[in-house]
Image (cartoon, grey):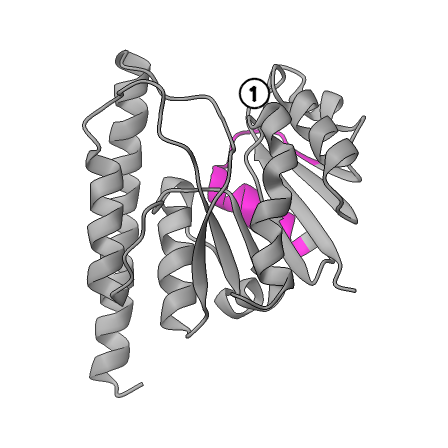
Amino acid sequence: MKKVSVVIPAYNEVEAIGATLRAIRERFFCQELIVVDDGSVDGTGELAKKWADLVVQFPVNRGKGTALQTGWQLAKGDVVMLLDGDLRESAAEAAHLLYPVLDGACDMAVAVLPPSRTKAGMGLAKGLAHHGIRMLTGFETAAPLSGQRAMRREILQQMGKLDKGFGVEVGLTVDALRAGYRVMEVPVLFSHRETGNDWSGYCHRGKEFVAISRTLCRKWWEGHRWSRNGL
């Protein structure tokens, strides 16, 4: 039987992390649960210790990519699942994301979440990610920015190092497809905190857009270099 590790990066998620971890422990089976507290100042890490097998606490915020990199390298599972810390009770739905990988239907399963309850932003970051992934790989994705994923450990080992910041999900998809792995999108009834139409929300989406642009440019250059060298 394949061992499953769940890795959760968390930054100031004290209001949600307890419910998320409890749902995983009580309603979804995994052999290892790792939380990487990315410099939280609200007690997220201390609360996570009640439920997680391992809690890594960064003294300062280092970004989602670094948190995920640290977490998966410590994980011992044959299958590694990446989940956000704000899923609360809906984290129990993670089993639906895991089955396609365990059954051999794909190498990486990406969750497609239900439509947002409220309209926020103009969809620029998502649109950029969608078109960028299609341009670089030919893959039509419905959830280019989804952080909820399950994958064979081999994929992460081959990639070596994940992209930093908000470009990590786009980078994961592009690298996996380019390496010949099978990526499947799976509808899962996850729910999480949505970015609003306030100044903070627009700043977040702006940073996300810039990070995705950098990741796509880097992936294009890598592909161009490999093609030019005949690799």
Q: Quadrant of the C terminus?
A: bottom left
Asked if residue 123 lies in the magenta stretch, the reply is no
Q: Write the residue at 63% across / 64% down.
A: 103
Q: Write the residue at 69% across / 26% down.
A: 45
Q: Is 162 or 137 nearer to us in this picture?
A: 137
Write down the residue under mark 1.
Answer: 12
Q: Is residue 70 visible?
A: no
105 to 22, vertically: above or below: below
State the image quarter where residue 67 is shown: top right
State the image quarter where residue 136 is shown: bottom left
228 to 219, vertically: above or below: below
Asked if residue 57 lies in the magenta stretch, the reply is yes
206 to 151, vertically: above or below: above
Q: Quadrant of the N terminus?
A: bottom right
**Residue lying furthest top:** 198
Q: Is residue 101 visible?
A: yes
Circle 1 SS class: loop
Residue 197 located left or right of residue 149: left
Q: Position of residue 134 (x, y in %)?
A: 23, 59
Q: Position of residue 205 (x, y in %)?
A: 28, 28
Q: Which residues are magenta?
A: 56-73
Q: Position of residue 125 (x, y in %)?
A: 24, 37
State the image quarter where residue 207 is shown: top left
Q: Amino acid at mark 1?
A: Asn
Q: Position of residue 34 (x, y in %)?
A: 70, 41
